[in-house]
Image (tube, grey):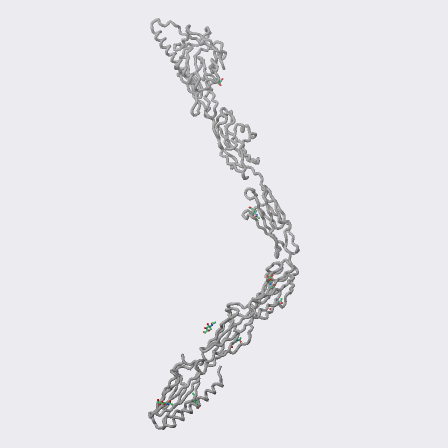
Amino acid sequence: MWDVEGKKTRMSVTVFVLTFFSTTQLICGSPPDIQDLNFTVSVDENTETLTTIETFSVSDPDGDSVSCNLAGGGTLFNLYSASATSYAINVLSNSAGFNYDFTASYALSVNCTDINGESTSASIQVDINPDQAPTITHPPSAVKVSENTVALTSLYNLTVTDPEDDPMYCNLTNVNPSSNSFAMWIATSSVYRFYLLGSQRLDYSTVPLYTLRFACSDSWGTSTSTLIVEITPNMYPVFSNLPGTATFSASSTGVGTSIFNVTATDVDSSTLTYSIEASNPSSSIFQINSVTGVVTNTQHLKYVLNSVYYLTIKVTDGKGSTNGTLTIILTNVNTAPTIQNLDNSISVLETTASGSAIYTLVIVEPNAYDTVTTSYSITPADKSSLFSFDPTTLKLSVNGTLDYETQSSFTIKFTVTDGKASSGPYTLTITIKDENEACFFDRTKYFTSTYEASAGMGSMDPGFIVSDHDNGDTYTLSIQYSASVFSNYFKIDSASGIITFAVDYNVDQGAYPSSGNLNVICTDTGNAMGTATVSVSIYDTNDNAPEFPQIAYVLYPSQYLNPSDVILYLAATDKDSGDNAKITYTWTAQMGGSTYYQLSATGRVYIARDLSDLSYGQTYQFVVQAIDHGSPALTGTTTIDIIYRQSITTTTTPNTTTVTTTTTTKAPTFLDYPANIAMVVLMCLMALALLSFLAYYLYKYCKKPGGCKIKSWKTPMNKSVSPTKPNPTKTSFDFWNETSDSNFKSKPFSGKRNSNETKIPMPAPVL
Ligand SMILES: *[C@@H]1O[C@H](CO)[C@@H](O)[C@H](O)[C@H]1NC(C)=O
Ligand SMILES: *[C@@H]1O[C@H](CO)[C@@H](O)[C@H](O)[C@H]1NC(C)=O
Ligand SMILES: *[C@@H]1O[C@H](CO)[C@@H](O)[C@H](O)[C@H]1NC(C)=O
Ligand SMILES: *[C@@H]1O[C@H](CO)[C@@H](O)[C@H](O)[C@H]1NC(C)=O
Ligand SMILES: *[C@@H]1O[C@H](CO)[C@@H](O)[C@H](O)[C@H]1NC(C)=O
Ligand SMILES: *[C@@H]1O[C@H](CO)[C@@H](O)[C@H](O)[C@H]1NC(C)=O
Ligand SMILES: *[C@@H]1O[C@H](CO)[C@@H](O)[C@H](O)[C@H]1NC(C)=O
Ligand SMILES: CC(=O)N[C@H]1CO[C@H](CO)[C@@H](O)[C@@H]1O
């Protein structure tokens, strides 16, 4: 960089030049005297502006005033007069000025002249000292760093100085392979420190070595160097005591017992973490403290069922891990109870009686002194009360009424435990088997009624509501005919339940009962039956008019009868029943006679007045009506002819002098019809009109003198016959006199007989 030999040469030349100038001045008087001016000065390249690089003083032996100037340095230097006798040479500018590489030395001359013109010159050589880059204390060939090294670890302390003590700056210029894991930061003015950053983990397996290039610069130059960083691989932790074995008695090892202390070492990590990676058989009953490596049990070991556990234990330094096996051997291990006859499926009839046992569990518990407890759950839970389980007998029983339609299947899960270990759940599946269930009525007894009617009529709806538990079952209704004769009078619609008459039903005269019970049966699809009783009432309809035994009566009351004597008991009949059969009698006198004869409402025809006013043969006719109490009322009609007749035989106790005659026989069905009755009445009226007509003409005819020559065939009518005392002597036969009727005893009767009377044969009396 610089040549010591070269500098010595230039100094010799300078000495020569100065010697020459001094000699010249001695010739002309006394020139100024320059003192203390060094022949040569050295100045740093980076000398600052206005730095004084040399001072000198000047004096004149003659006492003249002296002035000096400087030449040879261009504008880089100037001469500053501090006083009349002292001067300083200053650097004027260094910015573009000194550059050793172009000008290594400047030759300046100082010329001092007094007022007499005498001058002295002196030369000064200014040598420029070249500036130097910082000096790096070279690092060792390499630093070793573990790949586990954590962030912000210092890797190396670099000492760097600058010969000129210039401000300097060092930084990393390149990392190979590229990485941003390194930094170079200033620590003190002369120490730069290399750091490992956390931005990228070191990994020996991928990059085992980094080359860090760095540079230190001052404003005049740069020094560079290289730091080699060698990555050393992580060392795995190593177990100290695995594989290992621990032996415990299961029955007496409580929870939290220290089972084993796992230990491990690691040369390049201080923090190790332990874990149980696997357990064979699988179990969480053992745990390891991740920091201390202490293995403990989380449960009393009486609950465990295995006698050997193999634990795979892992220890890791965060980067690498090692596995080890810990074998735990247990003695006195518990055995869980088991249910031998489950899982299983059974089917149970829905008709199974409540209380019936349907299954008995078989439980095995190997440990003689253990007590087994059984628990169970039933699905569906809301019907769980349908079963009960006896923990002593281990019997499962039906507890209620099973119903296939409501729930056809149950699942019961049993679990057994000896208080330490359990087994299960074991499943018992119960299938409910359907049985046909009888249809049933909503009531046991129904009530219904109707009026008597003909077969097929008389519709009655008792309002049956029939149900059946079986899904999809239908039913039909029928009457149990064998239950009673009454049953046979009815039919039932098998679907609607409407009951009608099977016969022409008539309660008249008790022909059919007016009430009774029917047994109605529903029969479902499966032929199961339900029964109900129907109480049936049948009301009478007023469909029969009262009927007289005879359509006409002829009575012959005699002179022996007294007022209030009953001469006829009318007994019309009505085939209806109840009020419909009650009868009230009235009559209508056709041609008077009500004075002598009366009819009570109950049907008694009796003498109302002494008959002796009447003449024998006096006849009255009455039309009698028997009216029933139905609504509307029906009427039966008959006629009564009452003929007053002399009784020949005497009787001490004249009783009924009734003589009934069957003058005609009743046409059985003709008058059953109201229309016929009306027709008869009509015809009677017509006959009456005809008779009236004839009577009128007869009257007109007879009214003429001698006009009437026809003898009346029946004179008693309206003919006054004066009664006489009874004549004890029997007279000649007379219709009005009783003759051979043995029922009427002869009685002395004296009465004037009209010879004109026409006798009509007397019918045989009917009693
Ligand atoms: C000049 O020389 C004197 C004596 O010879 C010395 O003391 C002084 O330091 C020198 N000056 C410089 C700037 O070298
Ligand atoms: C660097 O110096 C600091 C401070 O003296 C020290 O803590 C650190 O360990 C040193 N680094 C190395 C790599 O020696
Ligand atoms: C190092 O410093 C120099 C000067 O300040 C700068 O120019 C350069 O970019 C820097 N290099 C890095 C890698 O920072
Ligand atoms: C494990 O270490 C603890 C103390 O740190 C000790 O009390 C315990 O007995 C040890 N366990 C075993 C199984 O040695
Ligand atoms: C350690 O054991 C675990 C679990 O068995 C396994 O996944 C892992 O690979 C093992 N590690 C070593 C280093 O054997
Ligand atoms: C058996 O049924 C009765 C009556 O429903 C009930 O009170 C009881 O709780 C039932 N038993 C069980 C074990 O469910
Ligand atoms: C008249 O005859 C009827 C029926 O034969 C009888 O019930 C009644 O007691 C008799 N009366 C007299 C007064 O004899
Ligand atoms: C040696 C030298 O150059 N001397 C000069 C000093 O200055 C005076 C006046 O300017 C000159 O005359 C000298 O020749």
Q: Residue 297, relative to residue 123: is it above or below?
A: above
Front one among 600 and 170 = 170
Residue 50 shows up from this direction? no
Q: Quadrant of residue 263?
A: bottom right
Q: Quadrant of residue 80?
A: bottom left
Residue 606 shows up from this direction? yes
Image coordinates for residue 33, horizontal then vertical, percent: 38, 93
Q: Residue 129, relative to residue 372: is it above or below?
A: below
Image coordinates for residue 678, horizontal then vertical, percent: 42, 18
Q: In screen coordinates, is 354 left or right of 114?
A: right
| Residue for point 61% across, 66% down | 262
Q: Residue 636, relative to residue 125: is it above or below?
A: above
For the image, the number of numbered tags is 0
Q: Residue 550, relative to residue 142: is it above or below?
A: above
Front one among 748 and 420 = 420
Front one among 568 and 493 = 493
Q: Quadrant of ligand 5?
A: bottom right
Image coordinates for residue 42, horizontal then vertical, percent: 44, 85
Image coordinates for residue 597, horizontal then vertical, percent: 42, 16
Front one among 665 and 563 = 665
